[in-house]
Structures are given as C-alpha cells and as structure tokens.
Image (cartoon, helix red, strand yellow):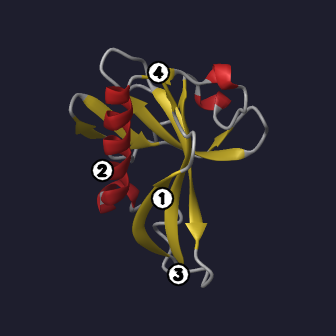
Amino acid sequence: MDSKYVLPESTVLELNGGQIALGAAARAWDEYYHNLIVVELPGRTPLYGEWEPKYAANKIDFDIEILSFGYRDGDSVGSTNISNRLVFSPNERTLVESLILSLFADAAATATLNPFALKVARYTGVVRFVSRWIREQ
C-alpha cells in the first residue's frame, strides 16, 4: 500500500481485492489531528477515512466510531466540504465496510496504536458507522 500516512509498523489487510491499514494521526486542514484509515479499492488510488474511540461512562471500555470516508487526501480528512469526498457504489460501500470491520477485529493490526495499546483501556469490539459516513450513488 503506497501512502505517506500508513505507519511502517501497520498491518495491511486484504479482502476481495481491497486493502486497508491504520494510518498515522494526521494534522489535517483544520489544524487538528485525525485518526486515519487508509483504503485501496480495486482500480483506485488510496482513500482516507476518520475513526475515533468512544469511551463508556467508566472511561475504560471503548467502541470505535467511523466518522467519515472517501477523502482523496489525508490532509482533507474531517473537512465538511462534501466535494472533498468521493461517491461510492453500493458494492464499494459493502467492501469498505467489510475492510473496516476486518481491520478493527484484527488484534495484531491495532496492537501498537492508542488507545488499543493502553493497559487501562479495553476495546469492546463494537464498530459503529455514523450517519452519512460515506457518500453513495
């Protein structure tokens, strides 16, 4: 996978011709850091999305929320300008969802990344996709 945002120690997973890896926390257009996922779909250049941990009231257990996906550049992640995100077919959406679920289910892929690596945090295994996380045809 060829992207400046993929960490050297990242595990790249493959599924149905697509690839996914966790990316570095990138300082984006808004000067804030965003947790990235990097995806390569068949016939496309790398695409980027944003995820964040959502902690339970006990501040130990956390789920993952997928906030957005489809950016052509990691520096644009989090932008509210809809034109920064590509539109996907239903089949592509299904593939992207499958890749994301596989990535966060793979303990080796997340082992070195915070908050997964923290001894005081516990991942529940739940991944939620927020409304309008992806643009569809």
SS for dot 1:
loop
SS for dot 4:
loop
Residue 82 at x, y percent in the picture: 67, 25
Q: Which marked residue is nearer to the observer: mark 4 or mark 3?
A: 4
Tell me which label, 2 or 3, sits earlier in the chain: 2
Q: Quadrant of residue 92?
A: top left
At a point 36% along the width and 38% down the height, the residue shown is: 20
Q: Amino acid at mark 3?
A: Val
Tell me which label, 1 or 2, sits earlier in the chain: 2
Residue 104 at x, y percent in the picture: 37, 55
At a point 31% along the width and 43% down the height, the residue shown is: 98
Cβ atoms at labels 2 and 3 below 8 Å apart: no
Tell me which label, 4 or 3, sits earlier in the chain: 3
Q: Is residue 89 or residue 62 the one in the foreground?
A: 89
Using the image, tell me which numbered label, if any, was put on residue 113.
Answer: 1
Tell me which label, 4 or 1, sits earlier in the chain: 1
Q: CA distance from mark 1 to mark 2?
A: 16 Å
Question: Dot 3 corresponds to which residue?
Answer: 120
Q: Amino acid at mark 2?
A: Ser
Q: Is residue 44 or residue 134 the one in the foreground?
A: 134
Q: Quadrant of residue 83?
A: top right
Q: Amino acid at mark 4?
A: Gln
Question: Dot 2 corresponds to which residue?
Answer: 102
At a point 39% along the width and 62% down the height, the residue shown is: 111
Q: Which marked residue is nearer to the observer: mark 2 or mark 3?
A: 2
Tell me which label, 1 or 3, sits earlier in the chain: 1
Q: Hey, which residue is sitting farthest right in the picture?
A: 31
Using the image, tell me which numbered label, if any, was put on residue 137.
Answer: 4
Q: CA distance from mark 4 to mark 3?
A: 42 Å
Q: CA distance from mark 2 to mark 3?
A: 24 Å
Q: Amino acid at mark 1?
A: Leu
